[in-house]
Image: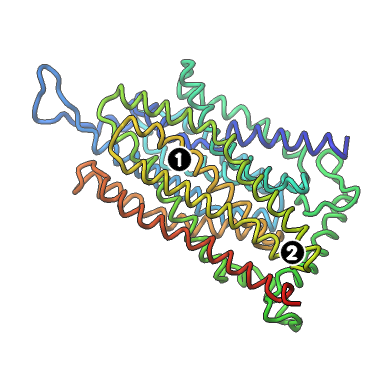
Amino acid sequence: YLALGQPLASGVWGLLECLGFVGILVAWASLVFVIKTEHYFEELCEPNAWLTGNTTLTDFKAQDEKFSLIFTLASFMNNFMTFPTGYIFDRFKNTVARLIAIFLYTTATLTIAFTSADEYSLLLFLAMPMLTVGGILFLITNLQVGNLFGKHRSTIITLYNGAFDSSSAVFLLLYEQGVSLRASFLFFSVFSVWHVGRTFLLLPRGHIPYPLPPNYCYGLCSGRDSREEEQKTVESKELEGQSEFVSPKEEIPDPGQQKELRSFWGYAFSRRFAWHLMWLSMMQLWHYIFIGTLNSLLTTPAKVSIYTNAFAITQFFGVLCAPWNGLLTDLLKQRYQKKASKTGFSASAVALCSTVPCLALTSLLCLGFALCASVPVLPLQYITFILQVISRSFLYGGNAAFLTLAFPPEHFGKIFGLVMALSAIVSLLQFLIFTFIKGPLQNDPFYVNVMLVLVTLLTFMHPFLVYGECQRKEGPPAIA
């Protein structure tokens, strides 16, 4: 049971948690359509001054701007607050982090459930950011479950990120079955019992270490002995990190240099981190702009319903797409490990080399998505939806997998949080772009899309630079 049953139970429960509840913001295109039908901010809509036949055309510009602002704020908080929540996870560990997530998530779902469109529409500005911050904190605590699966670690991590993206399908399923907005969010609130139960039954109070020590006990049996084993593992990993992450130019650094190499800020100001931040930020901005402007680009309610439903359905398949990225990383890592055993390559070189093809493939997928999204042909957007969900799944799954392989595990929460927080600052550009599209460009995003396609080409620099770093790390052993 301890060898297989409990890791499997933790993995399945974590997958269901990510798949069912924590990524509601990804369903924004469908969610905002439902919110509009509930008459939120309807008082901002004004009839146009001219008529077509007997029908008065309504101007939804002010209403759309409110929803764009809510989405911008929520997506910003989703990323920016990942750094403090990642610090909480690293410092206070699993139970404290998940209890905070439960409080934020449940408060948000209850607020939306009991919000009246007539009087309390502005509460959406509070509820949506709380919902997204709680959701991302659930995701951070779930990513550690990948440590239970050894050589399949990256596959599990990317699977969880894909499930996070696919969770939007649950909201669509409830709405299509006639469940109201209030009933849907009451349903999400009730499942806080699920989150509490998993926190205390199937996850440790602290962290799940990597690699797992012999006879490690967690979840239902987590006690003093398991925490002692975890601490020993963390200490041993810190000692290993002194050699694993040493610069090839400095084979024997003094103790002061070793401490600096192992510090969090030493990694945060590295070139590796800076290029990865650029890689994530540019492609993430593309996805946010596409999601935020999808409804406003459709001219009739019938088209909004058809295309937003198609978009939400394709989001569900993110859970099927994301693991391929992690599987490729795991297979390459195993291949390079065999090579390292013969040539003496360092563990850090093996880890970095296994990420290069995945980084390049993600950039290629995002470029294809950007090109299709730039073509103003509605039927083509079905292909855009498919490329969007695949590239998004590869993007966030690859981001988490890269950070676990390229940086020490004791800093994962802070590194993951910092890269997401800084990318959130870049994502604030989306509101300016939304305003520019709705104003001077009159809802025609073509020129903005062309500019973003050109920016996407810069993301190919990241895998090339990582590959160059791998070559420098591999050079000395190969010569020897």
Residue 61: image location, x then y, percent: 24, 37
Q: How far apart in space, not on screen, are marks 2 and 1 (Cα)?
A: 34 Å
**Sequence-first disc among 2 and 1:** 2
Q: Nearer the viewer, residue 27 or 244?
A: 244
- Number of numbered tags placed on the structure image: 2
The answer to whether 46 appears left or right of 351 in the picture is: left
The answer to whether 363 appears left or right of 376 in the picture is: right
Amino acid type of disc 2?
A: Ala
Q: Give the quadrant of residue 336.
A: bottom right
Residue position for label 1: 388
Q: Nearer the viewer, residue 438 or 318?
A: 318
Residue 323: image location, x then y, percent: 63, 41
The answer to whether 250 appears left or right of 286 in the picture is: right
User: Which residue is painted at 63% across and 32% down in the image?
Assistant: 192
**In which quadrant is the C terminus drawn?**
bottom right
User: How is the rendered protein coloured?
Assistant: rainbow
Q: Nearer the viewer, residue 381 or 262?
A: 381
Residue that protrudes farthest toward the front in the picture: 479
Amino acid type of disc 1?
A: Gln
Residue 432: image location, x then y, percent: 30, 52
Residue position for label 2: 347
**In which quadrant is the N terminus drawn?**
top right
Q: Give the quadrant of residue 91.
A: bottom right
User: Which residue is painted at 41% across and 55% down in the image?
Assistant: 456
Relative height, residue 247 to residue 371 (above, below): below
